[in-house]
Image (cartoon, rainbow, N blue to C red):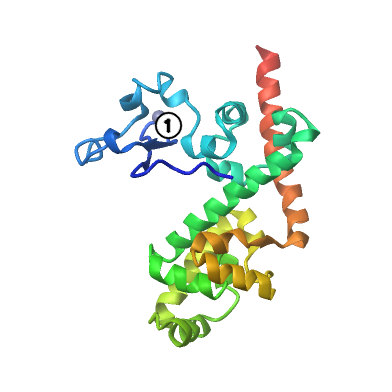
């Protein structure tokens, strides 16, 4: 399970290293987050390693020690963890007995990334995202399953949410761009879970996060995907090994 973020904390990106940093309520105000650049050096009092410190979103999922290890093979962020090759991570984590642990962490990262991706695809429209979640539309794959006019009608008739087909067309275009950029996202669909029990649980939880938890992988596609990512991360590992041996 991901660690619950402290109350009133916010996540920012460092303008130097690009990593995420969670700022506590007393660590930010309109001045520190103004037009000026924000860098890790502003947190030196509690984070002496500055930009070298592993990414906060990554640490919140795998812990500091593993985040530091993963960083060595360029898995420096939550999006990178979501796209990572599991066997490589298992090896880095210490061996086969860590498989379940690592698998869960990657899935957690993918959940969180899909959650963010959906909100960005919907141009930040939280209200419609919640309504779509009630229709079991939880991922970019789901939103592309039906024509925009169908979603427009369903949103209106079931949830009283008025979204034009044109807007939904744009959102579907956003989803296609996301799937192109993050190929692992093509594996995720909420629609494969449809049994009554899950529906009832969903009613009770009633939150978008509750719905995201229900998403299941489309196993068939996963196999193809694994082959792709193995090559990418293996290449990175090989590169590191080469660098090391030439020193
Ligand atoms: Zn930094």
- The answer to whether residue 229 is visible is yes
Q: Is residue 222 above or below residue 235?
A: below
Measured as percent of width and height from the top left, residue 5 is found at 44, 42
Residue 83 vertical placement versus 197 (above, below): above
- Which image quadrant: the N terminus? top right
- Note whether 156 is above or below 247 in the view shown: below
Q: How many marks?
A: 1
Q: Quadrant of the C terminus?
A: top right
Q: Residue at x 34, y 26 (%)?
A: 43
- Label 1 secondary element: loop
Q: Is residue 145 left or right of residue 29?
A: right
Crowding at label 1, few (<14), some or many (≥20) Cα neighbours within 10 Å?
few
The residue carrying mark 1 is: 17
Quadrant position of residue 246:
top right
Residue furthest to the left in view is 31
Q: Position of residue 77 (x, y in %)?
A: 52, 39
Residue 137 visible: no
Residue in the image at 35% along x and 35% along y: 15
Dividing the image into four quarters, tell me where ligand 1 lies. Answer: top left
Residue toward you, 116 or 149: 116
Residue 34 on image: x %, y % = 22, 40
Q: Is mark 1 within 8 Å of ligand 1?
A: yes
Q: Quadrant of residue 10?
A: top left
The answer to which of 115 and 145 lies nearer the viewer is 115
- Looking at the image, the residue that sits furthest to the top is 247
Q: Position of residue 207 (x, y in %)?
A: 49, 64
Position of 7 relative to 54 (above/below): below
What is the quadrant of residue 36 in the picture? Answer: top left
Residue furthest front as drawn: 204
């Amino acid at each position: 399970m991901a660690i619950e973020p402290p109350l009133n904390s916010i996540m920012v990106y460092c303008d130097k290293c690009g990593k995420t940093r969670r700022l506590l309520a007393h660590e930010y105000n309109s001045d520190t987050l103004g037009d000026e650049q924000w860098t890790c050096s502003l947190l030196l009092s509690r984070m002496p390693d500055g930009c070298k410190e592993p990414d906060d979103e990554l640490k919140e999922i795998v812990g500091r020690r593993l985040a530091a290890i993963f960083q060595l093979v360029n898995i420096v962020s939550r999006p990178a963890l979501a796209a990572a090759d599991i066997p490589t991570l298992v090896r880095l984590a210490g061996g086969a007995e860590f498989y379940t642990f690592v698998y869960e962490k990657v899935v957690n990262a993918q959940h969180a990334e899909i959650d963010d991706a959906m909100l960005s695809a919907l141009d930040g429209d939280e209200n419609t995202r919640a309504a779509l979640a009630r229709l079991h539309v939880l991922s970019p794959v789901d939103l592309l399953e039906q024509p925009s006019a169908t979603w427009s009608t369903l949103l209106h008739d079931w949830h009283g949410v008025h979204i034009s087909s044109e807007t939904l067309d744009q959102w579907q275009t956003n989803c296609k761009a996301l799937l192109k950029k993050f190929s692992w996202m093509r594996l995720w669909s909420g629609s494969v879970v449809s049994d009554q029990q899950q529906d009832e649980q969903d009613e009770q939880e009633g939150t978008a996060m509750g719905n995201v938890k229900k998403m299941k992988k489309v196993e068939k596609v996963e196999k193809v995907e694994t082959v792709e990512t193995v090559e990418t991360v293996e290449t990175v590992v090989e590169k590191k090994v080469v660098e090391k041996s030439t020193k």
